[in-house]
Structure formats: structure tokens, C-alpha cells
Image: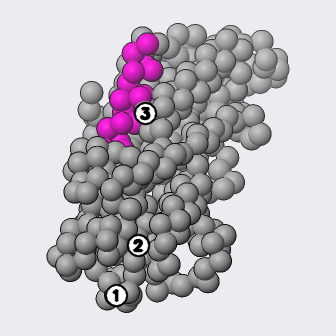
Amino acid sequence: MSHEGSSRVVSGRQNGRPTLEEVASLAGVGRGTVSRVINGSPRVSEQAKEAVARAVAELGYVPNQAARALAGSRTDAVALVIPETEARLFSEPYFLDLIRGVSAELAEADKQLLLTLVRTEAERQRFEHYLAAQRVDGVLLASVHGDDPLPDRIARLGLPIVMNGRRSEAEPVAYVDSDNIGAGRAAVAHLVGRGRGRIATISGPLDMYVARARLGGYRAGLAEAGFAPDESLVATGDFTEEGGRLAMRELLLRRPDLDAVFAASDVMAAGARGVLREAGRQVPEDVALVGVDDSVVARLMDPPLTSVRQPIEEMGRTMTRLLLRKIAEESRDGAAPGRRGAEEPRRVLPTELVVRDSS
């Protein structure tokens, strides 16, 4: 099911109705307190109940059908948000495997999947209005960049959220990730074991934690093998095939003597493979090549690509299970939504090197 930017959704105030946020502001309490009062939770002081009741009466606030979750029921819908274009979504095997895992887990739980692409600030704001109307029970968020404000905004709206990946080492929002540092280290250790000594890397965009972690693993692997750091062997890509091509050309110009490349995704490795072929370099005889994901791209390349497998579909399943658990706990306990801190669930799943003919 596709939903692009939530263009049909407007806030309650735009519809001429007072919003939950306005009730909270007038009552001088938080949005979660208003939700608990409307939900009949006993975990609210008499003073807060009276303040909310006065604000509701003054504003004429009535919970609408879209806000029925506040009355104790659920929408039985979960949003999977991917801040990428349609072209990237359907050309990147990673997202398709992730959606497969999320969809399978939601189907088993009899929940509806709302797939949402958010690509601009305007679309982000429209989607936030959609969420504020309580049209979904929780949010799964993938492909987050370090400066993305959406996870914190979703949490402030009081909705349960679990991310695929994280924005930093100190991520406060619940997430499921793979061992990206270990992926880089395993790739380098393998290439060193194959006798390669001038190992280059094509990283992802460095505003993403996943890219920085894989680059960190690459550097750690070189250090463990006794190699001095050499930034001329490092180029930045963007997790696309064209990005891999551009980075590979840059590396060959800088270091024509390189004998191995660790690309931070299979798709970028495919781009690098094309440039190496154009330059007359044989894989693996002249240049060994390793990617990450162990996607269908890796298996169909010529030669088949050695790749670090991350359990993408299982990550989708795991993050969905965590989200459904958070939704159930809040429904059962009447707890304040969007609780943050040490109790937020975090999972890091292991990776595994799959050796094929490219190395």
C-alpha cells in the first residue's frame, strides 16, 4: 500500500476542530497527560484531570474517529517510513528485503502495513500531521541520516517508534541494526588473508551512521593487520551504483596500484566492477572486490561477489516485533507513550562473510 507525503491529511485545527495539542497547552500539561485523561487512566492526578476537563469544555474538543486510539482502541495499522525516492526504493534490494520481513511479521499479527516515502521537508510535515491524527499505532523508520529530525518528532507525538539502523552510537530511539563495524573488519581480514596489501574502500554517505561504522571497521581491520592508514585509498559513495562508479574512478586516478576494494554495499560494488572492467582490470586477478548485504546483486555479478551478509529480512521482522510489543505494553498499562531512555529496546544482529569468486 503506498502513501506519498500524506497529501490528503490536515491537522484538526485546519479542519476547524481544536487539536489535542491545544487542549494540552491550555490545560498546562503534556500531550500524554491529555491522552491518559481521555483514556480514563488512573495514573493522572485529580488536579490534572480537572485542568484537562476545563480545557476540553472551553475549546469544545471532541476526539474524532481518527483519534480513536485515545479511547482505548487501535487502528491496527503500522507505518513503515523510508525517506528515499521511488527509484531508490525499487532498485535497492536492501529495502525490498526489509519490507518483506516487516510485511510478513505484520501479516502474522493481523496488522496493516502503510508504506510511506518521505523525501522533502513539506512531505515530512504533512506526514507528521497524519501521525498527529493517530491514524497509525506505531512507526518503523528506515534509512535514517544523522540530521534527520523525524525520529524525535515522532517520539514527541507520543507514538511508539523503532528504527532500522541508528543516527549515532548514542541513539536514544529504539532500533534494530546489524554489526556494521564487524562487517568492515571481516572484509579487510579476508582481503589481507588473500595477500592483498593496497586495500581501498568505497564508503556510504558519511552523514549516516551505517556508513561511518563500516568505514570504521575497515580502518580497524587495516590496523589489526599492521597497515598504516592511507586516506588516498578512501572514497565516499552514496549507496547507489552510480556512486560506486564515481568513487571507483576517483580511486583509480589516485591509486592505480590498488589491488583490492571493499565497497560498503553490493550495489556500489556493482558500479565499481563496471569501472574496473572498463579500465582493463580483472576481478579478482588484478583487483579483489568485496561488498556488503549479500543481496541478489552479489549473486548475479560476474564473477559472483564476495559479500558480508547482514540478515536484512530478519532485521525487518525483529524491529516489527519490538514495535508491536511496545504498542501492546502501552495499550495494556495505559503508560505514557513514547517513553525514552535506557528501557528503549536495541538489537544488533550479527553479520557473516560469504566468500565467492570476486576475491
Query: From mark 1 to mark 2, how far is it between C-alphas?
Result: 11 Å
Residue 184 is covered by the magenta coloring: no
Q: Residues within 10 Å of mark 3 (few under 14, many from 20)?
A: some
- Report the number of numbered marks: 3
Instruction: Identify which amino acid the numbered label 2 is placed on.
Output: Ala
Is residue 77 in view? no
Q: Amino acid at mark 3?
A: Glu
Nearer the observer, disc 2 or disc 3? 2
Residue shown at 48%/27% (left/top)?
Answer: 317
Residue at 39% x, 21% y is 104
Place of residue 26 in the rendered image (x, y in percent of width and height, measured from the top left): 65, 34
Q: Which residue is mark 1?
A: 256
**Residue 115 rendering spot, x and y as whole percentages:** 34, 33
Q: Which residues are magenta?
A: 92-108
Above or below, 234 against 272 in this view is: below
Instruction: Label 2, secondary structure: give it.
Output: strand
Asked whether, in this view, residue 22 is left or right of residue 299, the answer is right
Q: Which residue is mark 3?
A: 313
Furthest-left residue in view?
A: 278
Could you tell me which residue is drawn at 28 percent across and 46 percent down? Answer: 299
Would residue 107 be counted in the magenta stretch?
Answer: yes
Residue position marked by numbered label 2 in the rendering: 260
Residue 194, x across and y down, in percent? 47, 66
Vertical comparison of 139 with 56: above or below? below
